């Protein structure tokens, strides 16, 4: 079995499927090819895994004008990049082997931002260069000093952003999200102002990790969970460990805390907290956005549309109440609203009218 | 959402591909055979996991690699010469990677950017249009003034090059380690 040849064939199939003219015969051919041997299937898994990961290239494009492809090495010009990994002055190291707790107390920088090239970071990098000019060799320190106090982080529509906190925790921001971070010796505090974030909390029993959103406080010690804020409602999904949800009134806990174990999906509103206890796998389905996907399971079209609209400037509008309850399922690229619409049109009695800044969906046999 | 063997494999096994590849390159006398060898290891792991998922995926992966090489030796299909290929050397210490491994997110993006930059120019351009600007292959073809088929070809090529660069982290031939490994690797001998 020549692995190079198999890999080539697998890539050819996947590239063909990635293109426009994929039909049923192709799908059948591809399935048959995969069934020929496990080696074929594995070649597909390998490439698909990376192809999905490559969606993160999107992060490089933030702030770059459309139609412009930055030259090689552009990402490296920014002074953060290398420092991001190996600054001797940094409050912590991103080295996975090294927990950073002892460095965090009293460090000058609460947060180090991942290598995501956004407009904001470009602006900040100008400030960094200014700092370099003033302070000469103290570039790294200068950056950290500069960053101190400016602890708001946001992601653009359709963007995903990964932040490494100096305590060793990682925060992944979903589309259109803003958070504030304050790390102190007593606690780690995150305010979720808008959007959704996934938290991988480094264990530190002495400093609770607290996320507040819409009058709710979510307290963790070492765990993985996501928080999605939509106006006054908050959804908390736990995939590892456990967290506590409390209601806040005037900044203090009001009423008893709700404990959420791994696999829990909690919806917290002004009326209280509703918890669904499911499997961890089920909870993880809520995290599919981290790889750029929207995961739908028997989801009503109206809900799916709302979900897509979070990720895209081009908004979907349902003009026909008859189709709002259509149930759909599957995994779809969040950024590819056109593909979603195409699938809808092909598989369901739905007609789409692309009006430039929005796509209006209606039933196939309705007139409008 | 149930976890299929495919998902499990991508999550638990493929993350170790670079370590596995380096290991095979170190102990297997014929470097040209390493990609095929790796494939055979994967086939065994996948088929076995299909019936019964191993509790320690990484340990299982390396044990499978060791068994496979031993089998091949016994069947006399391979002759080891010299010290390379000493089967005792196959006993790497398997440090189970912690699930906290996602902390390497920054490195991942950095690696991705690097692999992207190392693509041939035309391929790099197509990847950008497809992955960053989200053009379809058809739109990319129109934009670059080429046939759709040419775009498809570049996509296929890009898929393969990125897979090699990011999973095996070897150079384009799949045989030599890519230069400039910068981050702390997780293998301990």
Image (cartoon, rainbow, N blue to C red):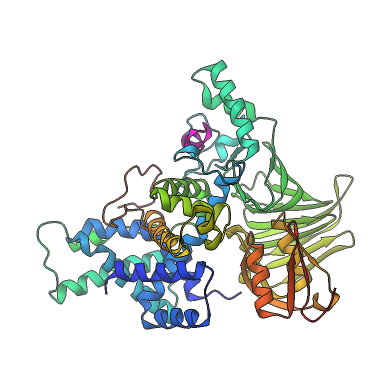
- Residue A201 placement, left or right of A43: right
Q: Residue at x 73, y 49 (%)?
A: A211
Q: Position of residue A302 (x, y in %)?
A: 79, 70
- Magenta stretch, main secondary structure, is helix
Is B48 or A350 nearer to us in this picture?
Answer: A350
Q: Position of residue B77 (x, y in %)?
A: 14, 73
Q: Quadrant of residue A346?
A: bottom right
Is A9 or B9 nearer to us in this picture?
Answer: A9
The quarter of the rendered structure image containing the C terminus of chain A is: bottom right
Residue A367 shows up from this direction = yes
The quarter of the rendered structure image containing the N terminus of chain A is: bottom left
Q: Position of residue A340 (x, y in %)?
A: 66, 68
Q: Position of residue B186 (x, y in %)?
A: 39, 51
What range is drawn magenta here?
A: A76-86
Q: Is residue A158 above or below residue A20?
A: above
Is B154 or A109 nearer to us in this picture?
Answer: B154
Q: Residue at x 77, y 69 (%)?
A: A303
Residue A302 colored in magenta in the image: no
- Residue B143 placement, left or right of A302: left
Is B169 or B60 nearer to us in this picture?
Answer: B169
Q: Residue at x 47, y 50 (%)?
A: B125
Q: How many marks?
A: 0
**Furthest-front residue in this view:** B145
Residue A107 shows up from this direction = no
């Amino acid at each position: 079995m020549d692995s190079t040849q198999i890999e080539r064939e697998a890539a050819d199939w996947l590239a063909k499927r990635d293109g426009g003219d994929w039909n049923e015969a192709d799908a059948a051919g591809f399935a048959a090819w995969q069934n020929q041997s496990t080696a074929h299937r594995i070649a597909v898994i390998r490439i698909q895994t990376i192809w999905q990961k490559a969606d993160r290239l999107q992060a490089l494009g933030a702030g770059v004008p459309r139609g412009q492809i930055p030259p090689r090495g552009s990402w490296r010009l920014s002074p953060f990049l290398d420092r991001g990994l190996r600054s001797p002055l940094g409050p912590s190291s991103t080295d996975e082997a090294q927990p950073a707790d002892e460095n965090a107390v009293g460090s000058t920088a609460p947060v180090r931002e991942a290598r995501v090239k956004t407009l904001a970071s470009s602006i900040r990098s100008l400030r960094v260069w200014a700092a370099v000019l003033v302070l000469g060799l103290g570039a790294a320190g200068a950056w950290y000093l500069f960053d101190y106090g400016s602890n708001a982080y946001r992601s653009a529509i359709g963007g995903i952003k990964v932040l490494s906190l100096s305590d060793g925790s990682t925060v992944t921001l979903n589309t259109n999200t803003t958070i504030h971070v304050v790390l102190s010796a007593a606690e780690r505090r995150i305010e979720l102002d808008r959007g959704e974030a996934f938290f991988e909390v480094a264990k530190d029993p002495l400093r609770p990790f607290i996320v507040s959103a819409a009058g709710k406080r979510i307290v963790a010690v070492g765990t993985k969970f996501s928080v999605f804020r939509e106006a006054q409602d908050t959804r908390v999904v736990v995939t590892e460990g456990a967290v506590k949800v409390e209601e806040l009134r005037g900044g203090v806990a009001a009423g008893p805390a709700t404990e959420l174990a791994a696999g829990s999906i909690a919806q917290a509103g002004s009326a209280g907290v509703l918890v669904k206890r499911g499997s961890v796998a089920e909870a993880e389905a809520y995290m599919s956005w981290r790889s750029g996907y929207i995961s739908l399971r028997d989801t009503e079209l109206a809900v799916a549309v709302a979900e897509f609209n979070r990720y895209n400037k081009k908004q979907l509008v349902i003009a026909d109440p008859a189709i709002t309850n259509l149930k759909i399922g599957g995994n779809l690229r969040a950024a590819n609203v056109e593909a979603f619409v195409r699938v809808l049109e092909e598989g369901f009695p739905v007609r789409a009218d692309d009006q430039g800044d929005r796509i209006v969906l209606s039933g196939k046999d309705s007139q409008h | 959402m149930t976890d299929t063997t495919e998902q499990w494999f991508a999550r638990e096994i493929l993350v170790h591909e670079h370590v596995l590849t380096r290991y095979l390159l170190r102990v297997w006398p014929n470097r040209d055979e390493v990609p095929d060898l790796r494939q055979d290891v994967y086939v065994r792991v996948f088929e076995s996991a299909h019936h019964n998922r191993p509790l320690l995926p990484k340990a299982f992966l390396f044990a499978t690699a060791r068994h496979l090489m031993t089998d091949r030796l016994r069947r006399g299909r391979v002759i080891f010469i010299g010290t390379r290929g000493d089967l005792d050397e196959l006993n790497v210490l398997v440090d189970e990677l912690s699930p906290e491994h996602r902390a390497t997110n920054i490195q991942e993006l950095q690696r991705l950017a690097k692999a992207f930059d190392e693509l041939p120019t035309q391929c790099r351009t197509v990847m950008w249009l497809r992955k960053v600007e989200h053009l379809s292959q058809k739109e990319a073809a129109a934009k670059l003034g080429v046939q759709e088929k040419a775009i498809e070809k570049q996509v296929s090529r890009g898929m393969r090059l990125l897979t090699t660069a990011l999973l095996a982290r070897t150079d384009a031939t799949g045989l030599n380690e890519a230069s400039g490994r910068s981050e702390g690797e997780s293998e301990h001998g």
